[in-house]
Amino acid sequence: MDNSIIFITKSWHHYTAAQEILQRHRIELPVFFASDVIDAVKIAGVQIENGAKVLISTDYLCTLFMEKFDVPIVPVKRSSHSFCMRIMEAREKGHRVALLARVGSSSFTQAAQEAQSLFDKDVALYYFKQNDKTLAATQRIKADGFTAIIGPSWIHEAAIQAGLEFLNVPLPESPFLDAISLARYNLRIYQERMEKEQLISAILDSANEAMIALDSRGTIININRAARQLFDVATDEVIQQPYEKTPLSCLELHNSLTLGQPINSSMATFRSRSFIYSTIPLPGSQDGHSLIVKCTAIEQLQEAEHNLRMKLLPRGSTPTKFFHNIVGQSAAITQSIEIAKRYATVDSTVLISAPSGCGKEVFAQSIHNASSRKGMPFVVINCAAMPESILESILFGYEPGSFTGARSGGKAGLFELAHKGTVFLDEVSEMPLAMQGRFLRVLQEREVMRIGSDRPVPIDIRVIAATNRNLLKMVQDGAFREDLYYRLGVLLLKIPPLSQRQDDVPALTRYFLTTRSMELHCSPYDISPDALELLCHQHYSGNVRQLNNILERAMVLSPTHMIDLATVRLAFDNAADPSVPSNTSPEHPLRSLRSQQEADEIRAALSAASGNRAKAAAMLGISTTTLWRKMRALQIQ
């Protein structure tokens, strides 16, 4: 039997009558008999815990239930017809009848008043108060000459003691059935309300921010999971409680509740944890406004900001290199690695100086990944690859409408996006003089100002700069700002060229052959001893990058997976022994070799960029115009 709707009574004749009515109408409804008021409340509480949603009872018990429980309560309305039938039964027996009702406006009292008005003075209506335990009214009724009394069943004993005939009021069938219909309607409404509340709670709980709903009196009517965690409370501790008596008292909500004034991003602290809160007042009355309060922890805002910046970063901003990725055990490279590791423990600006192809970005990434900023953005800015006309907007960002073609919502610059992370300025020597002044301010003040804005944006970045040129000589020649040079050169790191670490050529060769074999998903390539010996005695103006290019070319040219001496000679694209300059060339031998190496690098870049000259120029760190000029001079199609 479904116990969603139950009937509770403390009158035995109501209990039996209810069962008869239900059986006659084939209605399944649990009926409970309580010995007294306390027992009735206890039964109701137990049944609600077991799933009862609507309670049906008589007036007095319904009043008690409404004070105790938050479920729909349906009273059985008393009918004056029931009183009239009892009055006529008593008068047929020769009795003078008195009606006894409780002071108040219950349906029992109203029905008694209606019935008494239909009869002559032989029927009188007496009242008693709820706290009248002696029921002195029965004595007055006896003294006034009445011989029968009609009233609540619990005065039966007092009536007999006074020598009066007692007649109870039967449970009226029609009102009882009406109460059941109303209870069913209330059950449907209650279930719909609960479904809506559960839906609202689910929506609130799915929010990352702490959300609290308050009524116009400041009473908490809903609180989501994030808010319970933020204020360290359980739902039953705060629901239906004034917010001032809960941990939410740290919020200043008076003006929002009384005047409907919204709060936008105010700060509060609870147990040393800071958070931002806002309020959304809902339409209310003159007495106050309901509120939705949203709280966001500071660390949650910082995490969201970090995630947003990471999404906005250009591709390739995730550093993948570590110190253990740097190949070589020579004294020169080992010393540079040890110095770089020390630099990683502090937050000062680093200036890396090395010829092209020595792995400056590998060192920069390794320093970042070994520092406290690991996991934060690593933004690479190639100062030589960006046109001067757009470099400023890329670095500093711009406000809406700052220039023709600007995005309507503006755009954050790379310095802003690198907040909490590292900015790697490659080829910093190529930064235009006009831009150097603005960048100097970034280093000094740790803030940027977007184009078209008058509001500086504070940033927290570490700068690692790299160059293959002599910056000090550029300062002397007036091509680089002296103050910027000394700002960049706080920690100096020099990476040795391959000519100073030729002992590392064998290790680098095997590393490149293994790595490229894995990329091609083929069997590992090896190299013959005499071919390796030849590689160890070459001069590499392009350093490690040039060695990598030669080995990749040799892998393509080799008919087997064993690269021999002949293949290496062919890779150098020289019919004579590469170690011996050619006497037939009208050009200086070293210059000829360098030209050939430069051509090799350009071809490799064009191949990697699928023939796209702009991308190839960016990879080589030169402008598109310079690339076109070199291709024409080297007869590269």
Image: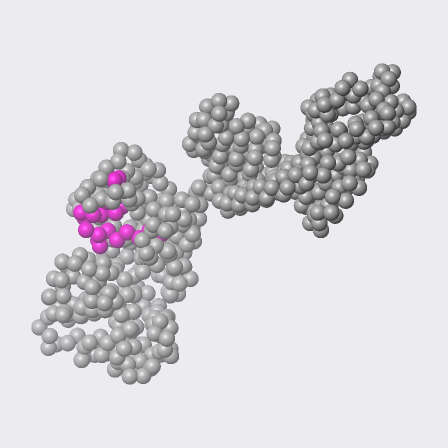
Image spot of residue 198 (x, y percent): 56, 44
One can see residue 266 in this view:
no
249 w.r.t. 120: above or below: below
202 w.r.t. 585: above or below: above
Between residue 542 and residue 132, name the one nearer to us.
132
Residue 112 placement, left or right of 327: right
One can see residue 459 in this view:
yes
* Residue drawn where x is 37% and y is 44% of the image: 419
Name the residue at the bottom extreme. 559
* Residue drawn where x is 60% and y is 33% of the image: 240
* Residue drawn where x is 37% and y is 56% of the image: 318
Between residue 152 and residue 187, name the one nearer to us.
152
* Quadrant placement of the C terminus: bottom left
Between residue 88 and residue 637, name the one nearer to us.
88
603 w.r.t. 434: above or below: below
Image spot of residue 324 (x, y percent): 42, 62
* Residue drawn where x is 48% and y is 22% of the image: 286
Between residue 148 and residue 368, name the one nearer to us.
148
The boundaries of the magenta stretch are 377-400
Quadrant housing residue 578: bottom left
Please say whether residue 468 is one of the residues in the magenta stretch: no
Count all numbered tags in the image, as a single digit.
Answer: 0
Image spot of residue 193 (x, y percent): 56, 41
Quadrant housing residue 280: top left
254 w.r.t. 236: above or below: above
Image spot of residue 113 (x, y percent): 72, 23
Quadrant housing residue 143: top right
Please say whether residue 397 is one of the residues in the magenta stretch: yes
